[in-house]
Image (cartoon, rainbow, N blue to C red):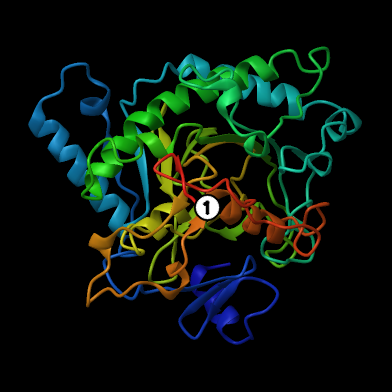
Amino acid sequence: MSTQTTVERASKRKPQGRAGVVNGKLYLSQGIVRDLAPAHGSGGQFDTIPIIDLAAMVSPDPEQRALEKLVADIKDACTRVGFFVIRNHGIDWKIVEDAFAAVEEFFGLPLEKKMAVHQSKSPSFMGYEEPYYTNVDRLKRGDLKESMTTAYDPWTDELGIGDGVPELLIRKNLWPSEEDAPKFRPAMEKYRNVCLSLMRKLIKILALAMGEEATYFDRKTTYPIAGIRALYYPPQTTPEDEETGLGAHTDVQLMTMIAQKPYNARSLQVLNANGEWIHPELEPQTFVVNLGDMVARLTNDTFVSTVHRVCNNGTDAVGRYSLPFFFGLSNDELVSTRPQFITEEAPLNPLYKNPITGYEHYNNRMRIAHHEHPTAEGKSSAALPYGMTKIDGELVPGM
């Protein structure tokens, strides 16, 4: 079905059930409403996903002009698209290949072995999800995918502080047994560490693109979000109103970095301001990077957290493995919009009036998206307890 037909059909019904476009607004089932054309800035004005070379960032002795060009390229991608593809990133691709081999090993287990580490057993949404466990677009069947989520571990992070992380903020992982999946845990931990190392460099470039010092995020990411969600999307064989790979959504954290196998799978789709779904074009050994909601909040939507989805359909669709790495602030860090992004031409988004911690934002989104989870909306509090909130890594009295 063409994009135009999908948009036309969605525009004729009320904004309930399946996410869709109604009167120029995009309604998403997680409580998100977006104008396709943003109120200010150039967000959504793209028909391709830019490819950015990170050689200057990972070089031990980069030229200043090359670094300045990289900052400008990142700023352009973040303000227009919210997505970009990275190459020359410095990651040994053998680590990525080993991670995919481990993911295939895990998803190849009998269902009862995978259900032994099901997400319903984790208060922090770690673990396995079977096909149709989520239904982001509220379709008849839901999201046709398997996933296995694991979280940051301060004891395996080379810069981690171990016992210095508040107990509440530690997302305890559910690992398959070593006997069932011997490759999985070591491969995921190695993949996490190389992604984290790269993201700690890229976040400095993002800070410069925002007009901040390169060190702006350092004290805000003492124990960062560094989650991996291993995914398998089988080919879809039913109509669009039955199921999809993953419904339209935005990401929660600062940035997401995605490897996929096969690299040229065309199932990830990014929504532009014209209501068109655009496919990133990946080269071998490259990652897709996209911004999340926290960057949009920091920049008053000048840097865009762009709606995207996974539709693994079409006559040439094949099974797609995906390894998104989600990077974010320490979960107790309070996030407010930076003043340079609030102007007469771009007044503060009313949704950003009250600062929020990553803990509250993440849990609010997860509780809505995972409505059958034991901690779903209405079943528990998403708020960070009194006395735990920090700004720039320091506790704030009275919060």
Tag 1: residue type?
Thr
Side (left or right) of 38 relative to 100: left
Q: Which residue is mark 1?
A: 357
Q: Could you say where residue 131 lies in the image, as x and y percent from the top left?
A: 78, 47
Residue 58's image quarter?
Answer: top left
Task: Name the residue: 27% across, 30% down.
Answer: 54
Residue sitting farthest toward the front:
397
Q: Could you say where residue 237 lies in the image, as x and y percent from the top left?
A: 73, 53
Q: Is residue 51 above or below residue 112?
A: below
Residue sitting farthest toward the right:
112
Task: Name the residue: 70% across, 39% down.
Answer: 147
> In this view of the protein, which residue sits in the foreground, 366 or 215?
215
> In this view of the protein, which residue sits in the foreground, 349 or 135?
349
Task: Name the residue: 59% across, 87% down.
Answer: 12
Residue 102's image quarter?
Answer: top right
Q: Could you say where residue 307 lies in the image, as x and y percent from the top left?
A: 49, 60
Q: Is residue 390 above or below residue 192?
A: below
